[in-house]
Image (cartoon, helix red, strand yellow):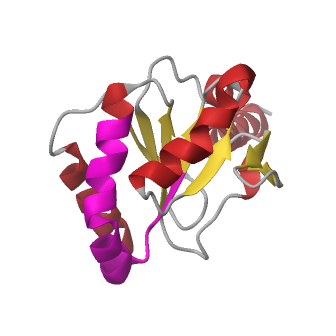
Amino acid sequence: MKKIISLFVLMLVASFGTVQAQLPAETLRAIDGKAVRTDTLSNGGKPFIIDFFATWCKPCNRELDAIAEVYDDWRKETDVKIIAVSIDQAQNINKVKPLVDNHGWEYEVLLDPNSDFKRALGIQTIPYVLIVDGNGRIVYKHNGYTDGAETELIEKVRELIK
């Protein structure tokens, strides 16, 4: 009986750990208005990066600009995809597309005006970056931005595709 209980507890802990490492299921809108479920985000079995930002957040914009400068190289080398998630509130959501267009960001952009996705992930501050592996597991988290931090992101992605 002890073995059965121990096995059950082990299975429960293992499955709980796996569930926490997956993306939560929230429905967001793409910048074009299409509904997107966050638990289905993928990059065809390859890693992808989720970057939480807001139009008013200067470090967020600096980070996304820095990534934009090397994004073509990153895609050629690793096929990584960037998904930028705006947490701008509903009254400011109309500022997101002009900002993205003005900066020339070629990212998939999702809108999280109620911060449901952000909250489901336990994120407190932005900018906040997640790296998700090809199996949909969150394998890296980082908050804040300092110049050059994007180098660490691509290094983590390179490790995943080895």
Q: How many marks?
A: 0
Asked if 137 appears above or below 160 in the picture, the reply is above
Q: Give the quadrant of the N terminus.
A: top right
**What stretch of residues is rendered in magenta?**
61-83
Residue 138: x %, y % from top left:
52, 48
Magenta stretch: dominant SS? helix
Closer-to-camera residue (129/34): 34
Q: Relative to residue 50, is residue 127 drawn left or right?
A: left
- Taking the view exactly as shown, the residue that stands out farthest to the top is 124
| Camera sees residue 21 | no
| Camera sees residue 161 | yes
Closer-to-camera residue (80/158): 80
Look at 68% across and 27% down and name the residue there.
120
Closer-to-camera residue (11/67): 67
Place residue 32 in its image quadrant. bottom right
Check if residue 151 falls in the magenta segment: no
Residue 140: x %, y % from top left:
40, 45
Q: Relative to residue 106, is residue 44 drawn left or right?
A: right
Asked if 121 appears above or below 151 in the picture, the reply is above
Residue 8: x %, y % from top left:
76, 38
Residue 154: x %, y % from top left:
28, 60
Look at 60% across and 29% down and name the residue there.
87
Q: Give the quadrant of the C terminus.
A: bottom left
Look at 19% across and 54% down and name the residue there.
151
Place residue 57 in its image quadrant. top left
Asked if 130 appears above or below 68 in the picture, the reply is above
- Taking the view exactly as shown, the residue that stands out farthest to the left is 148
